[in-house]
Amino acid sequence: MPARLTPIAAAVFSLTVAAHADEAPSRPPPQEAEMMKVEIKGSAAKYDARRDDTASKTVVSSEEIQKYGDTAVTDVLKRLPGITIGGAAGRSGGEIRMRGLGAGYTQILINGERAPAGFSIENLAPDVIERIEVLRAASAEYSTQSIAGTINIVLKKSLKPAQHELKISESRGNRGSSPSASLQMSDKNGAMSYSLGANVWRFMYNRSTPSWETGDDADGIPNVSRASTWRDQGRGDGFNLSPRINWSLANGDTLTSQTFVNLNKFASNSHSRTEVAFGAGPDYDRIDSTYSNHNGFARTDLNWVHKLEEGAKLDLKAAVSDARNSADSLQVGGNSGLPATLVRTVTSDSSEQGFSTQGKYSTPYTFSKPLDGTEATEHALSLGWDAGYTQRDDTRLQRDADLPGASPINSDEGFSAKVTRLALYGQDEWNITPLWSVYTGLRWEGLDTHADGGSIDAVDNRSSVFSPLMQTLFKLPNKKDQLRLALTRTYKAPSTASLIPRKFTSTNNSPTEPDRRGNPDLKPETALGLDASFEHYWGDGGLLSASASLRKIDNYTHQGLFYEDQRWIASAINDGRAETRGIELEAKFPASVLMDNAPKLDLRASVSRNWSRVEVVPGPDNRLDQQVPLSATLGVDYKTPDGQLSTGSNFSFRNGGLARLSGTQGGYTSVRRDLDVYALWKLDHQNNLRVAVSNLLGQDYTTESLYSDGNGSLNRTTVASGETQLRVTVETRF
């Protein structure tokens, strides 16, 4: 690659020219002096975070993120090794899971910070993302609320001068459609550069979801059989805006302002009908509902990076955020064709304002060379803090009409909560030898939650966790193989909502559809973790990897089920210990590493197997709630020699099965198979056409909620229909 002529190289070149000039015979000067052009070419190893960083990290580039033209970041994540998305394919609301674990075990960050309550990661357009970092073992710099791991979504930062790109997309399936558009702009003016990303979208759907409930008495004789159909249609609109301004200061410092704004609105109506074959019917065999929601989130931060002497650096950041959400719903229910006995309205409003500040001092340093002649030890030391304060105000008003035959349930359960957090950390990465490096870190995190309201008891919950961390990387002498090992202490803190003892009322209350209530006495789950992996690199981009992990969890949290005041209530409780284990195999390589003159094919595959055990739950199948026991991906990409056409396909598999959640509760999820294909045509230097088909198999997704005690059992089965979607995107640069 072209390189500038260094002072030493320039001096050597000048002396060489002078020496040859002395040896050459004298001649008259030319009429016009000729200018000599000197070009020096060299090669440099390409930096690979996964291969070279001591702290294990996998980075997904912007090109990979946009390859399939996805409109939701969850569609991008489902193709990554070891990551699965809950729920049915093609439907929103799926939970992001690493090691098969969701429910808060997987930490999701945006620019290194947690998103506020109520913000859905699905509202984040892939076009505003620069890269995705997957950290399978915790590091001190980020929060250690990451028992399963961390996914850090970094918004666009790279500022390429005079870059302007417009994308217009339309997605259609047999049950809905989703048009969208995005604009990316960046430019530079002297020491100031800027970028602006804007995305707008709409989705519409009309679908039907059937479910069945069956039950047996204490003797195993069927006593309940009923079938329900839930039809709903809705429309949502969303908007992202992400401006960024960067100033390069005279002394080498940088000052950066980055803002992210997200606005969404959604409205739906649904109709539920239940037919009873025999046995008791539900409280309401017909329910008609409307629902609307408006939410917005904005965060802006200012980041100053100050360069110090001898390579040291001070990185300071402050951010403010504001999130607001309002929702209104109306339910009308009746039974046996009689007039309605339920008319329920629920209105809720919430706002959350936050302030956070982070600071990091980092410096390289080297121990003097030992007298025994061994190499000096190079270190990279960092010290920092992460602090924040959040004020949340939440109101929820439920009113039932006083009708003949009705039993109104009215509630007014608003609350105000203040959450203060503080984290202090230190970390050091050093190269003991050219082949062996070690990372160590210490992080202390404290969390204080105070909440009160007119109808709930005051909540004061304070917790802190101290996390020692160690990771090491050993490269074998052949420079192709390397070993990794990580020892960590991580935790999962209860969310603010799970601590508030207010109740959410179920319309058809039963053991499989209980009311829900928070628990102010929840404690954090803590976990000791061990990760080990072997990686083999070969050729240009070839990788084989095998890894294993273990987590031992204390204060395990699961949903307890209680019968209180003639109603079933679910509430989270700490209950004993749990353990999870896993292995993961991954391979990716271009076809050229296997054969000469191979087509431009990139191949990739992965498989993950997970096990878990909850001590207080009797076996078999006493695994963590909805843990994915087996997942796999298989993909191929092809590019024509002229680079005008790129195409590829990805198959994702996620196994399900039965899980016992307690002595009386259980759950079942079916297998999920996703097949996606894409093609990208580069029409010319400015215009591209991208076509993608997602969920090509259109597979249905089945879940079951199970309850059994000494009086009998009740099972509820729900089937979410699969949907294939065709998406066409036109991209133009100007």
Image (cartoon, helix red, strand yellow):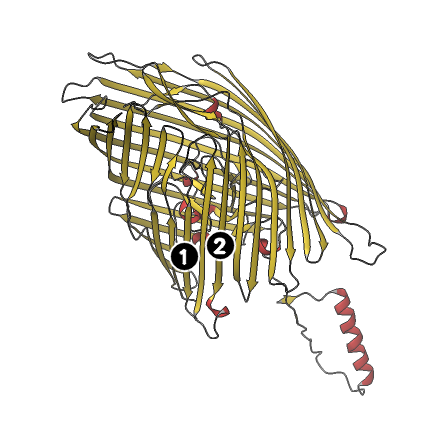
Q: Nearer the viewer, residue 178 or 231?
A: 231
**Residue where numbered disc 1 is placed:** 634
Q: Quadrant of residue 618?
A: top left
Residue 698, position as x, y percentages in the image: 28, 49
As displayed, is residue 601 above or below residue 65? below
What residue type is disc 2 on? Leu
In the picture, the disc for residue 709 is none
Residue 144, position as x, y percentages in the image: 58, 37
Q: Determine the residue located farthest toward the right in the rendered image.
A: 371
Circle 2 packing at 10 Å, graded few (<14), some (14-19), many (20+), is many
In the picture, the disc for residue 585 is 2
As displayed, is residue 323 above or below residue 646? above
Q: Earlier in the sequence, mark 2 or mark 1?
A: 2
What residue type is disc 1 on? Leu
As displayed, is residue 20 above or below residue 554? below
Task: Answer whether residue 564 is visible to the viewer in this image.
Answer: yes
Query: Which residue is depicted at the point 46% across and 14% down?
Result: 453
Q: Determine the residue located farthest toward the front in the rendered image.
A: 219
Distance between the alpha carbons at the discs numbered 2 and 1: 12 Å
**Dot 1: what SS?**
strand
Q: Nearer the viewer, residue 395 or 237?
A: 395
Residue 671, position as x, y percentages in the image: 34, 46
Q: Are marks 2 and 1 in contact (CB under 8 Å)?
A: no
Q: How many marks?
A: 2
126 left or right of 370? Answer: left
Look at the image and tell me in which quarter the C terminus lies.
bottom left
**Dot 2: what SS?**
strand
As displayed, is residue 177 above or below residue 506? below
Q: Nearer the viewer, residue 200 or 274?
A: 274
Circle 1 packing at 10 Å, graded few (<14), some (14-19), many (20+), is many
